[in-house]
Image: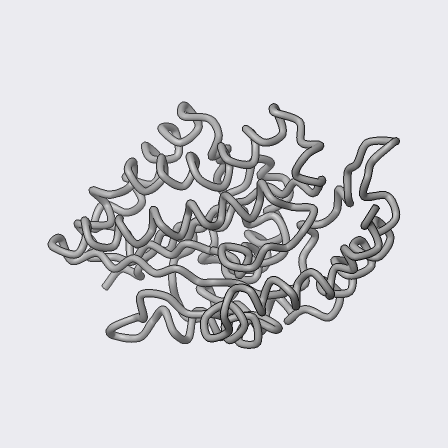
Amino acid sequence: MAPKIALITGCSTGIGHALAVEFASRGYQVIATARNTASLKQLELDHSNIKALALDVCDGDSIDRLYDEVSVLANGGLAYLVNNAGAHYAAPAIELEADRIRNVFETNVVGVMRMCAKFSKLLIAGRGTIVQIGSVTRAVPVVWQSPYNATKAALSQYTKTLRLELQPFGVHVCEVVTGYVQSNILRDGLQSAPDSLYTPIKDHIETMKNKGNSNGMPAAVYARRVVDKLVRKNPPPEFWEGAQSWYLYYITTWIPTWISHKIFYAVFKLAKLRR
């Protein structure tokens, strides 16, 4: 019997890399993708059941080329499509650059929509599962990254709708609401104007973000816990995973908004900006 196939986007580092290794360790044939396949060569060398292919989720032609290659490998259908590739942009909400906003939405939302549509036939054939790597920021108003937060909220609502629409065809759709995980998503740091109104708290916000990343759940642990849930006979429609995810779930689900607003206002030290 041929091994089941898992297609994963954004595998060069971090979560995507760890998920590729975890699926491979469980006997899946993994198709690991990234814009630059050179970053995936070690994955292929270390795991005979991982194949690296190029993919830019912002490029429709790139998605088409990937589909042509995958459809040959997965003629029996896909077991998993894991939409992990993502872009981040950290700047105050009133200082955003339109081109960078578009890039984040194109990567985190439009690219996911394109992938789900393009690979739907293979997923239906394999009665597979679509996995969306979401974020707690769909509900948590983390300052200095409103475009990213907005994409994760949009992804969540899209996922809920997609889940209903694909249910008649035997395809599961799962959202992993991700807390802090060690990765390089914050590698570009915080952006702000030279005369930004937010300069007094920039160092504090940057320290918080870096601490959250360094104290995050190791990517390998996150991947193991996520795949444990995904391979169940009936995987959950969504679950929260990663450091502080359940704490943030509690705050955003059970505490009134006016109280959680006060909590976040204090945590981010926004009172320092009062005039």
Q: Residue at x 50, y 33 (%)?
A: 56
Left or right: 258, with 118 as reference point:
right
Left or right: 158, with 176 as reference point:
left
Q: Position of residue 45 (x, y in %)?
A: 59, 54
Query: Would you identify the image quadrant in which residue 115 lies?
Result: top left
Q: Residue at x 39, y 34 (%)?
A: 66
Q: Residue furthest front?
A: 275
- The one nearer the camera, 79 or 186, is 186
Q: Residue at x 42, y 47 (%)?
A: 155
- The one nearer the camera, 231 or 272, is 272
- The one nearer the camera, 19 or 139, is 139
Number of numbered discs visible in the structure rendering: 0
Q: Position of residue 5 (x, y in %)?
A: 34, 55
Q: Is residue 215 above or below residue 171?
A: below
Q: Residue at x 71, y 40 (%)?
A: 91
Q: Position of residue 4 (x, y in %)?
A: 30, 60
Q: Residue furthest left?
A: 168
Q: Is residue 205 above or below residue 227?
A: above
Left or right: 244, with 197 as reference point:
left
